[in-house]
Structure formats: structure tokens, C-alpha cells
Amino acid sequence: MPAYALLSALLEQAVQWKYGTAGAAGLFLLTVGLRARIPAAVSLGAVILAVLVTGPAVSS
């Protein structure tokens, strides 16, 4: 279990470093939605992360 917590914290820091606060919020919504089984939160978090990841490719 400690390895899972460490991996989760490292992933969150990497997303926040690369995509800022919006990336951290998207990852937060995605993980909370998955754990609590809330489809709306999962969808919203996934859309936020997808827009952040594909944004530079679409604008070029």
C-alpha cells in the first residue's frame, strides 16, 4: 500500500508540474470519481486531462 501512495503522489506532482492547477484538478476528479464510482466526476476529469494533453497539438 505505501508503494501505491508513493506512486500516486509522484504522478500527481508530475501532472501538476506539466499541466498546472487544471491538470491537478482533472487528476483529482478522475481519481475521486473512480474510487467513489461517480461517473460524472470520472468523465469531467478525463475530459479536462484530454483537453490539456491535446491542446498544443490542436492549436498548431
Image (tube, rainbow, N blue to C red):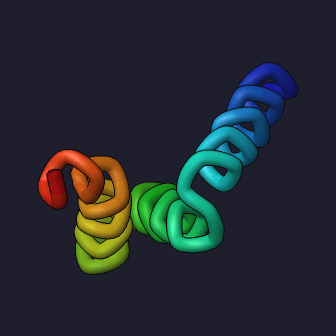
Q: In which quarter of the image is residue 13?
A: top right
In this rendering, is residue 28 above or below 54? below
Residue name at image x 16 percent, y 51 percent:
60
Whether residue 39 is situated above or below residue 16 in the rendered picture:
below
Closer to the camera in the image, 16 or 4: 16
Q: Where does the image place residue 59, in percent across and percent down from the top left?
A: 17, 60
Give the percent coordinates (x, y) of residue 42: 32, 65
Q: Residue at x 30, y 59 (%)?
A: 46
- Residue lying farthest to the top in this orientation: 3
Q: Residue furthest bottom?
A: 40
- Can residue 36 be seen in this snapshot? no
| Count of numbered circles in the view | 0
Q: Please say whether residue 41 is visible from this viewpoint.
A: yes
Residue shown at the point (57%, 65%) measured from the top left: 28
Residue 3 location, quadrant: top right
Q: Is residue 10 left or right of residue 46?
A: right
For residue 45, above or below residue 14? below
Please state the horizontal and vertical placement of residue 35, each as a whole percent of the image: 49, 57
Q: Which residue is most to the right?
A: 2
Where residue 20 appears, as percent x and y from the top left, is 62, 63
Quadrant of the frame with the N terminus? top right
- Whether 2 is drawn above or below 42: the answer is above
User: What's the residue at 86%, 26% (across, down)?
Assistant: 2
